[in-house]
Amino acid sequence: MRGIVTRSNKKRQWGRGPETMIDKRLIVRLLCVALVAAVMLPFGHVLFPYVSNVLSGTQFQAFEAVISATIGFGLSAIVG
């Protein structure tokens, strides 16, 4: 799995299996997703009444998803 690194300890604590560590890149991507979602969801609800006569609800949601993904990956590339 990409993003999640596992390593086994020679001493197992409390009977647990291999320790799981989350990669820094994964954390940065999750934070970028949270930031973009926090901005785009309210912005989309404000913008939708102005474009509803041109785009249907599904088309607008698809457009919003593409824009959100583009911004999120761009932000992740800049930060990460």
Image (cartoon, rainbow, N blue to C red):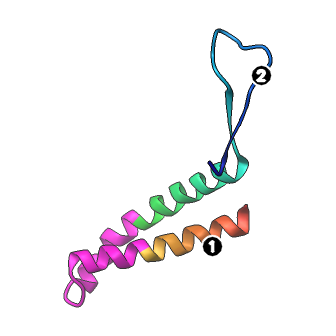
Give whichever of 41, 20 is nearer the camera.
20
Q: Is residue 42 above or below residue 66?
A: above
Q: Going by the picture, which residue comes out furthest to the top?
A: 14
Residue annotated with mark 1: 74
Residue annotated with mark 2: 9
Give whichever of 17, 30 is nearer the camera.
17
Give whichever of 53, 24 is nearer the camera.
24
Looking at the image, residue 1 sits to the left or right of residue 62; the answer is right
Tag 2: amino acid: Asn
Instruction: Give residue 29's position: percent from left, percent from top.
Output: 61, 56
Give whichever of 49, 80 is nearer the camera.
80
Query: Dot 2, how many residues are within 10 Å of its Cα: few (below 14), some (14-19), or many (20+)?
Result: few
Give me the residue at 44% from left, 76% from top: 66
Q: Going by the picture, which residue comes out furthest to the right?
A: 10
In this rendering, the label closer to the viewer, 1 or 2 = 2
| Magenta-span inclusion, residue 2 | no
Magenta stretch bounds: 41-65
| Magenta-span inclusion, residue 57 | yes
Query: Dot 1, how many residues are within 10 Å of its Cα: few (below 14), some (14-19), or many (20+)?
Result: few
For residue 76, which quarter of the picture?
Answer: bottom right
